[in-house]
Amino acid sequence: MEFRQARKVLIYTLILNWLVALAKLIYGIMTRSASMTADGFHSFADGTNNIVGLIGFYIAGRPVDKTHPYGHEKYETLTALGIGGILLLVAFDIIKNSIQRFSNPVIPDVNMGSYIVMFITVAVNIFVMTYENREGKRLKSDFLISDSYHTRSDILVSCSVIAALFAVKFGIPIFDPIVAGLIAIFIGYSGVEILLQTSKVLSDAAVVPPATIKKIVTDFDDVVNCHNIRTRGRQDNICVDLHIWVKPDMHIDKSHELAHSIEERLKKEIPGVREVITHIEPAGK
């Protein structure tokens, strides 16, 4: 992955996220809107996550060294894991404040400025989500893609805030803390989703179905069979480990060429494969 370009994307995203967060927080506090303020904290969490991501990209982009012979790229996944934890904490805090609003009701001062701020921030978030998701897929970045999913949830949350503002305007102020609580659920769900995705990478869960690899490998005439297929890593950095059976009389030079050909074929047909370890065994043994 090109970490320099990923950092550039994240810096642009950080600036936009914090502008959106400040607009929602300032106006939400001014109008005493729990849902709008909660949405502001949601956007502020986006910006905090971007800073964590920038740190992760810096570390993950470091070259291979003696203590990290496989590189530092998992640090990016580790920072994505941190995002999930932060989101769960934010969700808990918003739920707590929403419950307090039920026992101590506050009627927000909804005006035209509230709607303008929310509609503008939704438009900005749509742009950020599209831009970050597109660049994340192009650069094959776990962090950028997961962060774009978070921004997608932010758009849905902002739409619910707009609905709550209309409800308050029509004399139903109870909708304000209710929507704030729903926002917390969205934030918590995003956090759990990210935790599940990143934990698969950190726990070395399988990345590619063994049948896919077996089909490619057994297409070689010199391969009698293929077994013990294992994969791990991230979508942009897949490691493959497999055993192949060859004819017992195959010369070691030819078996070495076969292993090299298998590696090249897998890298060509499965995007993201970086390393292939092929264990050669004589058939029938």
Image (spheres, grey):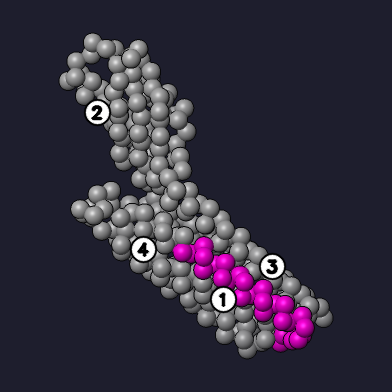
- Residue drawn at the location 60% of the way across and 65% of the way down: 187
Q: Evaluate whether residue 238 shows in this view.
A: yes
Q: Position of residue 208 (x, y in %)?
A: 44, 36
Number of marks: 4
SS category of the residue bearing label 1? helix
Q: Which residue is mark 1?
A: 41
Q: Determine the secondary structure under disc 4.
A: helix
**Residue 155 placement: quadrant:** bottom right
| Cα distance between the residues tagged 2 and 3 | 54 Å
> Residue 282: x, y in percent?
29, 16
Q: Is residue 144 above or below residue 231?
A: below
In percent of width and height, residue 148 lies at 50, 59
Left or right side of 41 for 72: left
Mark 1, Cα crowd under 10 Å, few <14 / some 14-19 / many 20+, is: many
Task: Say which amino acid is labelled 3.
Answer: Leu
Q: Amino acid at mark 1?
A: Phe
The residue under label 2 is 260
When the figure is inspected, residue 110 is found, relative to residue 63, above or below; the finding is below
Residue shown at 63% from the left, 63% from the top:
186
Residue to which mark 4 is pinned: 56
Amino acid on which the number 4 mark rests in the picture: Gly
Mark 3 and mark 4 lie on one chain; the one further toward the N terminus is: 4
Residue 142 x %, y %:
43, 54
Q: Which residue is mark 3?
A: 182
Q: Quadrant of the C terminus?
A: top left
Farthest residue, direction front: 285
Q: Secondary structure at mark 3?
A: helix
Determine whether, in the image, residue 245 is placed left or right of residue 251.
Answer: right
CA–CA distance in space, label 4 to label 1: 22 Å
